[in-house]
Amino acid sequence: MLIIEDLIRAVPHFDKFVAWRDMEAAVLRLAGRGAAEVEVLGRSEGGRPIHHVTMGRGRYKALFVGYPHPNEPIGGLTVLSLLDLLSQSPSPLGGLDVEWHVVPSIDPDGMVLNEAWTQKPFSIGSYVRGCFRQEPRDQVERSFPIEYKKLLFDAPIPEVRSLMGLMDRLRPDFYYSLHNARLGGVVAYVSKPVDEAVCAGLTALWSRLGIPVAAPGGGSALESGFEAYAPGVREIFAVPKYYDYLESRYPNPEDLLHDAGACSWDYLREISPGSLSFIMELPYLRHPMSDSRRPIGRNLREEKLVIDAKNKALVSRLLDLWRGVEAEIEPSGPLYRKVKHSILDHEDEIHLGLPSWETRTEFIVNEPRFNREMVEADLFGLMQTRMYALANSHELVRVLESTPRTPAIEAALDGARSIYDVAIAEIDAQVDNDRFEMIDLDALVRAQLVGGLIALESDLRAKGGG
């Protein structure tokens, strides 16, 4: 039986998120020492290897996958911790009848594109300028094939084809897709109900490590129609079930799913129905405004519309600059693809609000819940919405930065950078960047790794292992 305190003590110390070069070096050291079997599942568009590490032998197969979303870096440290624990002699995990499979980074190109912020102290500016996250159709986590009612998607990206091949081969009993949030409270998501002891164990772990639990109803809007099993433990989002939920409310639910496919655990459920998929969304930042109920005397709907208008104005100004130099831009690569799929393909929808934004203008106008006085937490949420919109359009600037410099490109870059400087300063004036506090990385990694092991051990024992 796993001894939680021993596991917590065994997790190594970290003082920053891992860079791709350091993760690759760690994997190659394991292979060089003969401590693990390492194969290359495939290569990214940029030519980087996608490694698959195997350690141990057992009837029960566990698969851990890092960077299903490339801007979610806690999982990189969790992967390194797991490999470290398995390498220890004796290993605190040696008594489990488990064959361990690890994909340290399923999206190495995306991981590298986020190093502009992950390798620095957090700031609003570094995050906005350095964050990269593909549109759903180009993400590992949302481009698995699916055919369900009117929803049809069969364009998996190369990284997904590599992961599908591994899943087909392993049919893992336990699957851990390593995600994280940015702010808020922790939530664990499971693909099937888990034992009450698992919920209690997770709650005790989070309390022991000082990590707040998400408030009821405080999770993503994508949780609509999904069950809550215990505080902080919820049913995992599943595209078919979400489609059914949307179908009960909208005539064409497929139009609301962003031209994307299924999630990795949706695919695993199809090929291995008895498997347990597990996610733990952990925040890595705190801010005192995020929970403040202090009234600020402004109407929430009006302020949402102001931010909505500012986001539209920013994208419109960027597009004006883009059109002046578009002929000089090479239409290839992940940054360009993000600009195309998130902005260029939706130029005629800017007045409605881009599809990738949290809310469309019509929803802000018609939603009665928004007609109330704001509190500080609402203002903080609005600034997060603004940050999200800025970060999801800044790839346009990064494309310009990667384009051979001509006078026209230089002028467009100067204009675009100036737009962002002003917008970032406005956010900072409202929330004060210096009030962000990074949650202790060691606590986060211990929570993500040990929490996953609690769920794994319970499922292993339920299936007759030990």
Image (tube, rainbow, N blue to C red):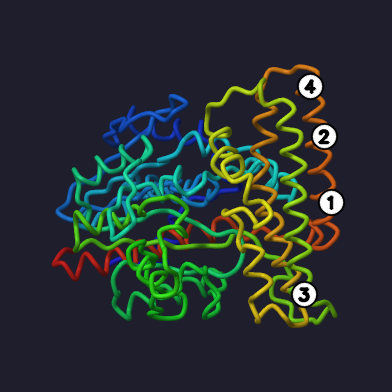
Q: As shown in the figure, which amino acid type bears the numbered disc 3?
A: Glu
Q: Is residue 178 left or right of residue 335?
A: left
Q: Is residue 383 left or right of residue 97?
A: right
Residue beneath disc 2: 415
Mark drawn on residue 425: 1
Q: Secondary structure at mark 2?
A: helix
Q: Is residue 216 left or right of residue 170?
A: right
The quarter of the displayed image where residue 339 is located:
top right
Assess whether mark 1 and mark 4 are in contact (beta carbons under 8 angstroms): no
Residue at 41% in and 63% down: 252
Q: Earlier in the sequence, mark 4 or mark 1?
A: 4
Assess whether mark 4 and mark 2 are in contact (beta carbons under 8 angstroms): no
Q: Is residue 281 left or right of residue 103?
A: right
Residue beneath disc 3: 376
Give the image location of residue 322, x and y in percent: 71, 32
- Packing grade of label 3 (10 A; few <14, some 14-19, many >=20) is some
Q: Secondary structure at mark 4?
A: helix
Q: Secondary structure at mark 1?
A: helix
